Image (cartoon, grey):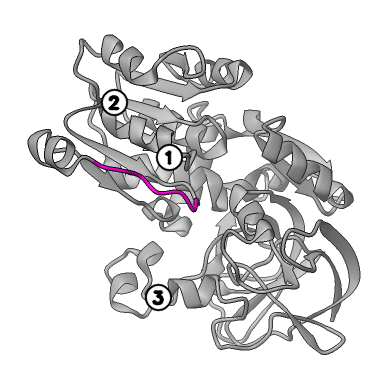
Amino acid sequence: MKIKAAVVEKQGAPFVMKDDIELAPMGPDDVQVHMVATGICHSDEALRKGDAVIGYPIVLGHEGSGIVEKVGDNVQNFKPGDHVVLSFYACRNCENCLKGVPTQCLHYADNNLSGVRPDGSDHFTEDGHRVSDMFDQSSFTTTTVVREANCVKVPKDVDLRKLGPLGCGYVTGSGTVLNTLKPKPGETIAVFGTGAVGLAAMMAGRISGCTEVIAVDIVDSRLELAKELGAIHAINSKNEDPVAAIKKLTNGYGVDYAVDTTGVTAVMESSIKALNQGGVSACIAVTPHHIDVDTWNDLCVDDKSVIGVNMGDSIPQIDVPRLIKFWQQGMFDFDKTEKFYKFDQINEANADSGSGKTIKPVLVIDEAYKPGE
């Protein structure tokens, strides 16, 4: 089956729209999805630039939403016509998956970041040559084939164009707080970087009952949005020392939790310095940069922890519907970060994401789609 896809032909190259990409045939565990929309994530840009290499040419995209067209014989939970959000693939059979932590699937890298399907077959080809995939999904397409485990069923009366980023960016930020840090009501949190992931973490801190929710960024417009979405305080770290400002807001002690979404060395280190005694900093950006940690003063004497979190330690089939409910109740206004673009505007949308002009670009692939139908 030939489909239209946005292809990156070599490292650092722009997206090229092609309509001759061959989609792999369905297997018994597969679900064929007509794509309605997809978010653009900074992880897509990292792979496009080559910060992490899967192989080129490649079809990126991993925040897709769409409508099920066909299902394989072994698929139990989905049928044609279902509305779905797509997320990462986990095998469901390894020890960590069976413990209920699919983000730590022992085959996570092979299944999501090897460029081929979990069984080693090609997801896409062009003129008989491999075109690599991402997350066993590749949502920068008009149609894709995924596994049942990639899919999350969502209500048909909710606008699919808005929902795709719930499968990665929003579930990563919110899950880091709700699933991993688990702050108690009355505790404090600072979020460094107010892009989609950071704002999701910040909103989750407010949902958790944190009495100090502090947003840190260098862009005033983002900080204003952060305050609209629930930040108690906003700090422009270009104008003042964020560590000093955070400690001033917390009686000199620092916050109980910090989340860094920037991946910038100095900012990650600030997220640790801003912690209270026994505090935890989660560094969750896809970044090639490293940090210098004072193991004696920070980790031992101050009993601080620095952790990494993959995909918010989420179970998408549980967490995505939960986020939709929070949104419907006015507690998680993720759609205020989104801006729609046409599919063929992908390079413009990606540039706007990189510059910070748009927090969460969403490519509308099916322009004929009407919410609620």
Residue 101 on the magenta span: no
Does any portion of residue 63 appear in the rendered image? no
Q: Classify residue 245 by image quadrant.
A: top left
> Residue 120 at x, y = what percent?
58, 88
Numbered tag placed on residue 274 in the rendering: 2
User: Residues in magenta?
Assistant: 287-293
Look at 59% across and 22% down and name the residue there: 222
Which of the pair 72/18 is nearer the observer?
Answer: 18
Q: Secondary structure at mark 2?
A: loop
Asked if 91 appears above or below 121 in the picture, the reply is above
Q: Quadrant of the N terminus?
A: bottom right
Toward the viewer: 81 or 43? 43
> What amino acid does circle 3 point to?
Arg
Query: Do residues under tags 3 and 1 come within 8 Å of each other at their CB atoms?
Result: no
| Residue at the disc numbered 3 | 92
Residue 46, horizontal then vertical, whole percent: 61, 55
How many angstroms separate mark 3 from mark 2 (CA)? 38 Å
Identified by mark 1, the residue type is: Thr
Q: Assign a secondary structure to mark 1.
A: helix
In the rendered image, the vertical position of residue 228 relative to residue 320, given as above or below: above
Quadrant in the rendering for residue 365? bottom right
Kindly report which numbered mark, 3 or 2, lies closer to the viewer in this rendering.
2
* Residue 55: quarter of image: bottom right
Identify the residue position indicated by label 1 in the image: 265
Viewer-nearest of discs 3 and 1: 1
Please count the marks in the image: 3
Query: At label 2, which amino acid type do we have?
Result: Ala
Residue at 32% over, 30% down: 208
Disc 1 to disc 2, C-alpha distance: 14 Å
